[in-house]
Amino acid sequence: MTTNRRSFQRVTTFDDTDSVNDATDLLFMEHYISGSHPFAQSAYIARVRDGASLIPHGVDPIRVAVSDGTQSVLVSGPDWILCTTKWADGSARVSVAAQSDPAEHSGAAPFALGLARRRSRPDPRATVSL
């Protein structure tokens, strides 16, 4: 991948329909958009286990935003940044941006997405009748 770290001016507009969760998403996206973390993966999780944290153990949040039952958490490590959003219905999204391609080695992105999937739970509505 060719790296072009040329900086472009970016403008963001917030209005009364935006929440603190949107601001947290923007802080995460800035790392990807700027090119400082050019590799990204995201996963939607239909059901997260009650009380499960979607961030790696021992990592302190940079930002935590809560609005109308939705919680967004932003954390970072040596070469990655992760943003989780949990909605009131028990679903979640986990997004990771990394400085290096996680497909080339065991990086943070696969670890974080794998962690999130392990902390999900099966949907009881998805049953098989015999």
Image (cartoon, grey):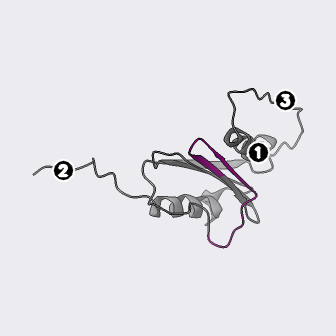
Q: Is residue 40 visible?
A: yes
Judged left or right of residue 106, residue 122 is left
Q: Provide the residue designation for mark 2.
A: 128
Query: What residue lies at 35% left-to-right and 56% top-to-bottom?
Result: 122
Q: Residue furthest left?
A: 130
What type is the residue that disc 2 sits on? Val
Determine whether the residue tagged by mark 3 lies in a helix, strand or loop: loop
What type is the residue that disc 3 sits on? Val
Judged left or right of residue 124, residue 53 is right
- Whether residue 61 is in magenta: the answer is yes
Query: What residue lies at 72% left-to-right and 66% top-to-bottom?
Result: 60
Q: Earlier in the sequence, mark 2 or mark 1?
A: 1
Q: Residues within 10 Å of mark 1 (few under 14, many from 20)?
A: some
Question: Disc 2 versus disc 1: distance between alpha carbons?
Answer: 42 Å
Give the extent of the magenta segment: 57-72
Q: Is residue 1 visible?
A: no
What type is the residue that disc 1 sits on? Leu
Q: Earlier in the sequence, mark 1 or mark 3?
A: 3
Q: Provide the residue designation for mark 3.
A: 11
Up-down relation of residue 17 to residue 115 (above or below): above
Q: Earlier in the sequence, mark 3 or mark 2?
A: 3
Q: Position of residue 54 (x, y in %)?
A: 56, 60
Question: Disc 3 versus disc 2: distance between alpha carbons?
Answer: 50 Å
Up-down relation of residue 34 to residue 114 (above or below): above
Q: Provide the residue designation for mark 1.
A: 27
- Whether residue 43 is in magenta: the answer is no
Question: Disc 1 versus disc 3: distance between alpha carbons?
Answer: 13 Å
